[in-house]
Image (tube, helix red, strand yellow):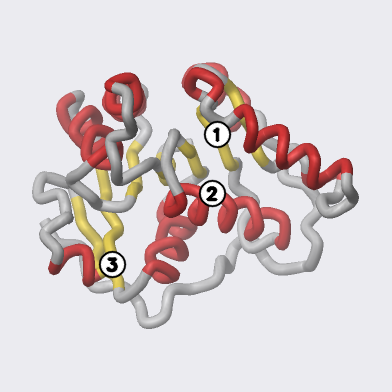
């Protein structure tokens, strides 16, 4: 993997450990030569992630809806910034630009991004690994819930491995590198993810 879409909160959380996690992940990915694609924000964990990567010499591409640019929430120091019309276009471009998905602690927006990546993998819109960094047990309940959905017959046994959860970044990336795509529910070509419509504007530097 040479690039990852990283999903995380636009809030800081209620502990300094969350911002430290985001900064550390950004810096480590930069040192390992992994480019970051993220939501383009300058606040919360999103801003800390970008600052950590940029401070370590990494490449960071933002993808942000036009409305959030108008709210002055776009990071101005990125390697590239794609401005898109809406949230759907944003997530579609994440799928196009990244080799995989990495989820850090976050809220409802982060969950939306994570579950769409999982759903698209299940359907065959992409065949890329979906990683979950379970910092301090933050996602223990979500992991258990995912297992409960499978136990209750709503997720096929073959699809339980779509979410790759680890509690450290090195072990998570190693597992994501070794990910083997499952048989999708339907025969959608992973080479053709659901496109953004209309297409995003050219990158701004």
The disc label shown at residue 88, or none: none
N-terminal of the pair, mark 2 or mark 1, is 2
For disc 1, the marked residue is: 132
Residue found at x 72% / y 41% = 146
Graded by Cα atoms within 10 Å as few (under 14), some (14 to 19) or many (20 or more), the crowding at tag 3 reads many
For disc 2, the marked residue is: 114
Graded by Cα atoms within 10 Å as few (under 14), some (14 to 19) or many (20 or more), the crowding at tag 2 reads many
Question: Quadrant location of residue 60?
Answer: top left
Q: Is residue 174 above or below residue 155?
A: above
Quote the CA–CA distance across marks 2 and 3: 18 Å
Q: Is residue 190 above or below residue 163?
A: below
Look at the numbered disc 2 and give the secondary structure of its residue: helix
Look at the numbered disc 1 and give the secondary structure of its residue: strand
x and y, in percent, of residue 137 in the image? 55, 21
**Where does the C terminus fall, quadrant-wise?**
bottom left
Q: Is residue 202 above or below residue 104?
A: below
Closest to the observer, 112 or 77: 112
N-terminal of the pair, mark 2 or mark 3, is 3
Quote the CA–CA distance across marks 2 and 1: 9 Å
x and y, in percent, of residue 93 in the image? 41, 62
Residue found at x 25% / y 52% = 40
For disc 3, the marked residue is: 65
Question: Quadrant location of residue 202?
Answer: bottom left
Left or right: residue 32 compared with residue 61: right
Residue found at x 74% / y 37% = 161
Residue found at x 60% / y 41% = 129
Quote the CA–CA distance across marks 1 and 3: 24 Å
x and y, in percent, of residue 27 in the image? 28, 24
């Amino acid at each position: 993997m040479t690039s990852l879409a990283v999903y995380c909160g636009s809030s800081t959380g209620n502990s300094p450990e969350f911002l430290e996690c985001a900064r550390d992940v950004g810096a480590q990915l930069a040192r390992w030569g992994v480019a970051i694609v993220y939501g383009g924000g300058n606040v919360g964990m999103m801003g800390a992630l970008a600052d950590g990567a940029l401070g370590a010499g990494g490449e960071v591409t933002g993808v942000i809806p036009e409305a959030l640019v108008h709210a002055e929430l776009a990071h101005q120091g990125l390697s590239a910034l794609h401005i898109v019309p809406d949230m759907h276009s944003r997530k579609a471009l994440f799928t196009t630009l990244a080799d995989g998905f990495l989820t850090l602690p976050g809220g409802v927006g982060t969950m939306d991004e994570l579950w769409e990546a999982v759903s698209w993998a299940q359907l065959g819109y992409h065949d890329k690994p979906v990683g979950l960094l379970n910092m301090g047990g933050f996602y223990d309940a979500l992991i258990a819930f995912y297992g409960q959905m499978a136990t209750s017959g709503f997720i096929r046994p073959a699809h339980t491995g779509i979410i790759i959860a680890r509690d450290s970044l090195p072990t998570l990336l190693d597992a994501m590198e070794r990910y083997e795509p499952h048989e999708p529910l339907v025969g959608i070509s992973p080479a053709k993810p659901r496109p953004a419509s209309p297409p995003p504007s050219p990158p701004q530097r």
